[in-house]
Image: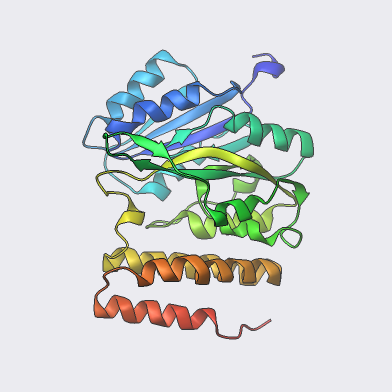
Amino acid sequence: MPEDSAPLVTVIVPGWNVEPYAAEALSSLQAQSLDRWRAILIDDGSVDGTGSVFAAFAAQDPRFTLVTHPAQRGLGAARNSGLELVETPYVGFFDADDVMLPGALELLVGSLERSGSDVAVGQYTRLRPTDDGGYAPASVQPWVEASTGSGHTGVTLAEHPDVVGNIVAWSKVSRASLWRELRFPAGLYEDQAVTQVLYTRARAIDTVAEPVVHWRVRAEGTSITQREADPLVLAACLDAMRDGLAVLHRDAPAAALEARIGQILRMDLPRLSALDLDPASRAALEVFAAELTEPRDA
């Protein structure tokens, strides 16, 4: 393959029981203005038609490669399966129930190609259900805007600490070399600590001050973030935030740690406190809140 047409970025696309959304997601990849990509589709033991949708796209577009897990292993394990197959300079992640905006890869990969930075971070918006049974994008939320600012090139965490508020895997592209010894953990909210590790390993970071992904809020309420009143889900959420803060405390400038703590205090605690929690979960949330204001050793 000529060097000027070889894939630049691998997009890892896990999916479990997302048949109603998968075709739209994969079509949005095919619509990218940058066509030098390949995608690893991981059917994580789906029991609906997700695997069939993935297989159909892989059969008609050689840029798609299908990996099938015979049984569900979890989102982190599915992403890790994709990471084992990356041969391009850059890697990104994309969930198979979301929508990638047409210029996303061109913006993110193009920024890294020009700057030489290690990670490019874009904004995202929620794709919310509408009364007519469809979905419509909402506005970019304040903490997402803060994570990119007005757009930065080649900054460090000390120069732009608010970037650590963007803790999802799928709104960014990074150099594949950062992932040589980095993998996702098992469990829920698996991207929070990994994303903070990515930031701390990056020599320089670019941010793109416009949306690159529409993040679907499923009408049927089956997303993890829609089930945080469940004691097990809440516990996983709190543990993931602790793990991310531990990474920043260990390896990041103090400003980055304080930026993340401030975001949790402003956004996550009020949201979680408003849930209908059982007494044990309420107590666990209060313990976590107290931890955020405790003095930290240097």
Q: Quadrant of residue 282?
A: bottom left
The N terminus is located in which quarter?
Answer: top right
Give how far across and how far down residue 117 sits, in percent.
74, 44
Left or right of 114: which side holds 191? Answer: left
Res 56 → quadrant? top left
Residue 67 in view in this figure: yes
Q: Residue at x 55, y 32 (%)?
A: 10
Asked whether, in this view, residue 78 is left or right of residue 233, the answer is right
Q: Residue at x 35, y 30 (%)?
A: 22
Q: Nearer the viewer, residue 137 or 14?
A: 137
* Snapshot colouring: rainbow
Q: Is residue 191 above or below residue 49?
A: below
Which percent across, then down, holds residue 212? 55, 37
Give above or below for 15 relative to 272. above
> Residue at point 40% right, 64% down?
237
Total labels: the figure holds 0
Classify 110 as above or below 30. below
Regarding residue 166, the answer to whether it shows in the image is no
| Residue 84, percent from left and from top | 51, 39
Specify the quadrant that holds the C terminus. Answer: bottom right
Residue at image position (55%, 66%) is 263
Residue closer to the observer: 244 or 230: 230
Near-viewer residue (197 or 205): 205
